[in-house]
Structures are given as C-alpha cells and as structure tokens.
Image (cartoon, rainbow, N blue to C red):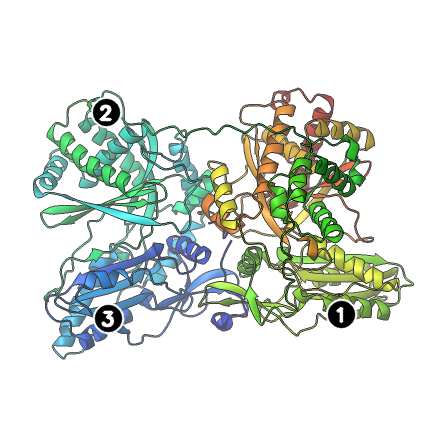
Amino acid sequence: MREIREQGRIPTSSPIASADRPHGGPGPGEAPLSAAQRRLWLMDQAAPGAATYNVPVFLRWHGRVDVPALRAALTEVVRRHEVLRTRYLLRDGDPVQQVVPAAPVDVEVVATEDARESASHRVALPFDLAAGPVLRATVFHGAEDAVLLVLHHIAFDGWSLGRLGTDLALAYDAAVRGRPARLPGLGEQYAEFARRDAADAGSAETADRVRQRLAELAGVPAGLTLAGALPKEPGRRVVRDGAEQVAVLPAPLWQSVADYARAHRLTPFVVLFSAFQLLLRLRSARTEFLAAAITANRSSVEVEDLVGFFVNTVPLRCAVPDGAGFTELCRRVRGEAYRALTHQRIPFDRLTAAARTELVDVAFALQNFPRPAADVPVRWDQPEILPTGTAKFDLLLTVEPRGDEARVSLEHDTGRYPAEVAAALLESYVDILALVLADPAADLSRFAAEPPAEEPVRAEAPATTALSGTQHRAAELFAAALGELGAEAGQLGPRADFFALGGHSLLVVRMLRRIEEETGVALSARRFLADPTVAGLAALLAEPAPAAAAPAPADPGPERPATAAQQRFWSLDRLPWLRQAYVVPAVLELPAGTDPGRLRDDTAEVLARHDAFRSAFRLDRKRRRVVVRAGDAVPPVTVTDARAWDAARLAAHLAEACWRGFDLAAGPLARAEVVRHRDGVLLVVVAHHIACDGPSMDLVLRQIAALGRGEPLAPATPPSPAEEAGADQDTEAVIARLAGAPVDVELPHDRPRPPEQSTEALVVRASLGPERATALRAAATAAGCTPFLLGAALLGVALARTGSQRDFLFAFPWSTRSARDEEVAGMFVDTLLLRVDLRDGPSWTELLSRVRAAGQAAFGTSLARFDAVAAALDPDRDTSRPPVTPVYLTVRDTPPPGRLRPLEPLHIKYELELTVVDDAGDLAFELAGLTALFDRGTAETLLAAIVTAAEDLSTGPSARPLEEM
C-alpha cells in the first residue's frame, strides 16, 4: 500500500488540520501511533472508509435493552478508555493520536424483526479516523433485542472484547439501577503504550530482531497457492471482497483437542495450527511454506486491562516432513511457535519491508478471548463478530471456543478462493483434525495430496503480413512524425512498430493531431496503442469517420472530478516530506539586455491563459474523491533586483523560489519570478505537478518566448476530458501481467532507508560519445528498441551485476495528452511500469526483445490506474519508499526551450532516477539518487556500470551480459 504504495496525510488547508501546531512532535493529549496502528492508518489512507478493519460486535440481549442506560454505560466506558475517544491527525507529516474530551455516546435505535439482518447493513459503514468517533452503537428492538457495536480496529482488538464486556456490564448494571456508572481509573492509557511501542519499533534492537527473524525464515518461498485457487493475484489489495464459511467442532472433537494437548504438553494453538499446516501441505503439494499466526501481543501486565489494538501478524516457517506422524508434526510446530513468539513484537510491516516481499497469504487465529469478569449479570449472549464482506488475507482460519464446542470460520478472498472452494477447505480441516487425533502416530502420508492446477499458457496469434493501399498513407504519417529519427516511408513495412522506430507518447499525440487537422477525424490514442504499427494505423484510417466529438465546454462548471493521477498527487501532497518532489520548477537563463518588465508581462499573460494554473483541489467527502474547481486567483509574477547579491545569496534565493510548495485548496498553482542579477536575467517558473507536467512547462516557456518575439498565440482552449473508457480493463490486465513481479529493487544504498522517504538528490552524468553511441543505436535498432527501452535494459544489467536481484520493475512517465491538448498546459502524464527480467541469464539480443515486448505491453495498457495497480502489487509498503519500485526511468529527446540553469538543490520522487538523453549524435545518461541513501561515489559507480553495460552491448550483442561479470 506501502502508493500510499502513498499516503494519505491531511492537507494543512483542511479544517481537520487547522489545529495542527506549526512545529514539533505530538502535542498535549497526543501520542505517536503504535506500530500496529500506523499500519492500519496507512491502509485507511490508501482506501478511506474501507470496511476491512471494521470490527462489528453483535450482542443478543437478554430481554429489553434499556437505551438510556446503555447510552450512559457506553459513555462511561468511552470516558475510561481514552483510545475509544481518539482521533488521528498529523503533526509535521507524522500521524498522531489525539484524545478528545469525553462526551455522550450516540445510540441509534432501530425497530426490526430481524436484528442480525439489519445489523449486516451497518457493519461496513465507513469511519473517518481524522474526525472520529471510532465507535458506533445501534440498538435493535424486536422480538429479541440486540445491540451492535462497530469499532475501528485501530482502537480495538479481539482481546479487548473481554475488557469492554466487563466494563459495559458493570456500567450498564449501575445505570439500570439508577446509580452513577463510574468505573475506576486505569493505571495507564493506550497512548502510553503507543509511545513505548513507537520508540521500540524504530530502535536498533528491533532492526537486529528483524534481520535475525528473516535469517530464520530464509530459503522458504513466500506466498502459497492451494488447489482450486483462481489465477494468482500479484499481492493483497488494500480492499478486496471477502466472505466467511463457518463450521463447528462438536463437543467430542473439541474435548479431544484439549485432551491431546494436555497429554503431550502442548497448547491448543499448536494442535489446531498443526492440523491447519497439514491441510495447507496437502492442498499445495509443498512441503515447506510460510503461514501466519495472529497473536495477542500483550506481553506486559500494564496492558492487560486496556482496550486497544495490540495484535500482530507473526509468520511461521512450516514444514511437514515425509514419514512423520501428527505427534512429530506437533513437536516441530511447537518449536517453531516458540521461536516465532519470541519475535512477536516485531511489527509485521517491518518484516515485509525488509524482506522486499509479502511473506504470507494465509493466516490462523485462535480467539480464546477472555469472558467478561464482572460481579454483575452479563445481559447478553457470547458476542459474535459479524463478517464485513472483506478479507485481510487470501485465507484466514479462526477457531473460537464457544462453551463445549468451538466455532471455526474461514474468511476468504472471493477473488482468489470462490465460496465452494473455501467451503471444501473448511470441511477438510475439520475432517483432518478428527482423523489425526484419532490416530496421531499414523504416517501423515496416508492423506492424499491435491496440488493446484497449472494455469494455461495462451498462444500468441501470428502477425499479419498483408498489405493495403491505406498502409502507404499510414507509413507516410509514421515517417512525418519520426522524420528526425531517420524513418522513411519507403522503408517501412506493415508491421513497422511506432515505438521500435524511436517514437514516444508525445510523438503519438503530434501524429494524431496532424491526422485530425488533415482529415477532421479525431483518432483515440488508446485505439492506436492497441496496435501501434503501420498496419494498425491503416486499419483505423480505413474505418468510416465517426461522428464528430463535442468540443470541450468553454465553462466546464464549478467543479469536476480530478483525474486518477491528480487524485494521487493530492494524496501525496498530504505527506509533507514529499511535497517538494511534486513541484515543477524551471530556471531560464537570459541575456543581460532582457527587459524585466516586458518579460514579467509576457509571463503573466501566458500563466493566466491556462486554466490548470488557476485551479484548486479539494476532497469531496460525500463522494470520497478529489474534485477540481475553477479558480479566479491569477498566478503571481514578480521582479526581483539581485544585482547586488553574491553567488551564495542568489543560489539560496533560487532554491527557495524553486521548491516552495503550493496550497492546493486555495490556488493558484503556478508562479513566476524575474530575477535581475549581475550577469543577466533569470526567469523562474514554478508550478505544482498536479497542474503541470514536463511538456507543459516546455510549452509555457515556448509561449513566453513567442510573445517576446511579437508572435501571436493561438486562442486558449480548456483541456479535453480525460479518457476513462478502458481504464478498468487496463488496470486488471496490468495486475495480471505483473503477477509475481518484485515490488522493490535491491539498490546499493550507503545508508538504511529513513522512516519517511526523503527527496533531496545528487546527480551524476556520463556521455558515450558519438562513436559508441552509433554502435549502441545499431544494436538497439536491430532489436527494435528505442533509447528509452535500451536504457531500461542497461539499468537492469547494471543492477544485476552489482547485486543479487535479476527481476525488476521500473516506473516511467507516459503522456495521456490528446492531440487537441498539444497547446494546453496541465497534468497529462501518468505512471506506467516496465518489467526487466534477467532471471535465466539471457543474451543481449534476447534481453532487448523481452524489454521491447514488456514496453509494448505497458504502452498498450496505458490507461491503467497506477494507484490501483500499486495497491494490488504492493499493499504493505511503508512511507520509507515509493510504491512498487524505487526506480524511475525517463528519456529526454527534445531540445530544451532555452538555456536552463541546473537546479540546485534537486528534489526527486524516487530513490533513483535515470534519464536517457538522446541527442542527435550522442547518448548520455543522467543518474539522480537521494542523498539520504547514496554517496556521490556510489552513484558514480552505478553510472559507470551502466556505461560499461552499454559498451558491452555495442561490441557483443550476442553475448550474455551476466556472464560478463
């Protein structure tokens, strides 16, 4: 999740954030989040209001519920337990918990004949963690009264149920008797535990424990697929549909569990988990795997009486040896459980982050919750935790003692395990438990294994070689768009690929715009990308002309939904430590004779003509999405006389001017400054990325230059609506295609990642020179690769040669700009993912072919929503790194619109960013790395490895690059 992947901090303009102090950590009445709370908070920010971590407690009441007494009792319970009247805010970019004054608890009253059915409609209603409260109460009056308490998991866990029940019974009994419901104070509150836990989670000791535990788990492949599973998802989604299957361990079988555990000096957990492990072994055909145990994690007496969120997920190494009986298996499980429980305080997300993978798909919990211990009548049956229609794992098996029996439930991800498969697994578990307890010494090999089925491999359709007259026109359009790259119409066949010839997304836009200008037909970039060849374009040109699309309205209305990329940038703006990376500055160097007043006026005219720069963004909480509203605030343009300043003062002023943030809720989202200095004039233009991409900044600078030359500008037009059709399909395709890809990259860090990702970077540069660049282009052209794809292959080889990883995902920008928006400034870029796979040691030729195919697949699914992809591939990422991959790759193949001054300091979005600079006669590489992670010497070494890889490719394309190490 870690896009959170990116996420969710409250913007300083939010009413909720208005109480935020300007500096420092938690204030009075505040505390940091515990490690467990922080993970849930990040998940909630990635999917606000999702029901995954709602805890619905359903109580069947004995007799009529006295609503005033219940309200008084709940008010007293909430007064006693501060965590139940806590909200979650930000202080300087870190989430904190803030206790609010005690207040009466609202109780909804509903008349119904089916309390459980009515309750099921309320379990998934969202919580707003920033506003609170984190508890809701509903009374159902009917033939049998019931109470539903829904709490957010961030403030409550299963063990808390006993404490809550005790306090509620005491307070309710006092209230119905007309006495004040005053409960004694607590020795400490949850916030005090959270302070200790947060400090412990960031300690060197915890880092050592993480390394030790991962060493114990080393060698066991992560993930687990059982028979009957649907095609493998690449990772847990932040929100995914779920269901629950339920069975009962009858009294005789439940007694057998207790008797066997007692006789062999085991805990019931070990017996029950061993049977679960055997089930997983039989249904996966794997003898070794990882599964998780959900632990109470209340290891000190100080927290025993507290309501709060303490539980942790603890991965266990599971091995079912051939020829062993159940008793031997239990003995092994007991040893592993003891080892694992010594590490139960390690935050689970610290383990997954360090392992660079999601460790477990399946989990087990024994919910032996304490019963209310009140010396008064308990007026309800044993609580029932209702399903929320969501799932936390692929499979979560829970055993809960209920009197002489036990309830067994299997929560399952319905997108992974359909109901009939999950029901069969649960039935098998009960059967296996009964069989092994009946004869625990028998060889476990008597159980028949059922391995998961292999997924079918789809055959590729052969490419067509047919020619048509329309293809000649398509070839001419290709040649016109790619003319600077040497493409000639007469040399292009029907399967000539636009991107293999050196094209990129902006050239697609220009080609389609030319087609629209010449023919009046607006072709969709998405349709062209489905087959970006001469034949594919010819097929589009041969289609009957569609009805003309309605032009974008001159006044799009007061508000419109933000694009998916804009929503992501709005969320990222809530992370203060990342804000500078999402500012887009440019510093243009101009001669001393430039008229500052004229330059100011020209710049103001250009900035004012683009709607994006006057916009503002807010969160529509009712619709739970970010919206854009048209604003009247004109981007400011100022003039500064710096002729008396020395170089240091000028540099400091430029750094502040370039990287100062924006208020997205108020606007405007651009500004400019004309700076007169000793040697000339500087034009500083700055915009927020939510309103401006790189090509838009180039457009602004070109338009300012045009006004300076006295050239008129075309009439301003509003941006076209973002293309949405096909986004869901593309998103699903990307998630399926990247199943199993790594969601982190092993980089040569000089220092560990800090808890929050930094942005300040250093940059190193290297050029190949014309001779080597020509040889390298020839090798790339022979493989049908662009300089961009070539750069991806070289970077993959360099990283593989300097580390142990062989499979990589790199992020890269993709223009979503339509042909009509070529002269419009705005945010027309999204993020795509490119896979570079060297796992079987391919030759250079094979590697380039793979990268080309991966690029074409990425281009063809360019409408994929990056946030959704990141949530599926990398749901558990933390704030220490970007989502899915820390590496970003781009290409610069157009000359800058003037002489640009290097940005010092530089701020970047990823840990490592490689730019391939494609000049007419040369190829160069610019490598930027975060100064918090890399020394300059390390960056230079990695860049040298990229250059060495380029030299190796240019001289021996048939060689295997990893054999040249």
Left or right: residue 31 compared with residue 341: right
Left or right: residue 768 compared with residue 46: right
Q: Quadrant of residue 661?
A: bottom right
Indicate the secondary structure of the residue bearing disc 2: loop
Left or right: residue 908 compared with residue 10: right
Of circles 2 and 3, the one toward us is 2
Q: Position of residue 163 (x, y in %)?
A: 21, 60
Q: Find out whether the residues at labels 2 and 3 contact each other: C-beta distance under 8 Å.
A: no
Left or right: residue 262 compared with residue 725: left
Indicate the secondary structure of the residue bearing disc 3: helix
Cα–Cα gap, marks 2 and 1: 76 Å
Q: Position of residue 940 (x, y in %)?
A: 69, 37
Cα–Cα gap, marks 1 and 3: 57 Å
Residue highlighted by disc 3: 74
Task: Pick whichever, 138 or 158, lies toward us.
Answer: 138
* 112 up-or-down from 756: above or below: below
Identify which amino acid the numbered label 1 is placed on: Val
Residue highlighted by disc 2: 448
* 60 up-or-down from 531: above or below: below
Of circles 1 and 3, the one toward us is 1
Numbered label attached to residue 265: none
Indicate the secondary structure of the residue bearing disc 1: strand
* 208 up-or-down from 591: above or below: above
Residue highlighted by disc 1: 637
The reply to whether residue 853 is in sight is yes
Q: Position of residue 493 (x, y in %)?
A: 71, 30
Marked residue nearer the N-terminal end (2 or 1): 2
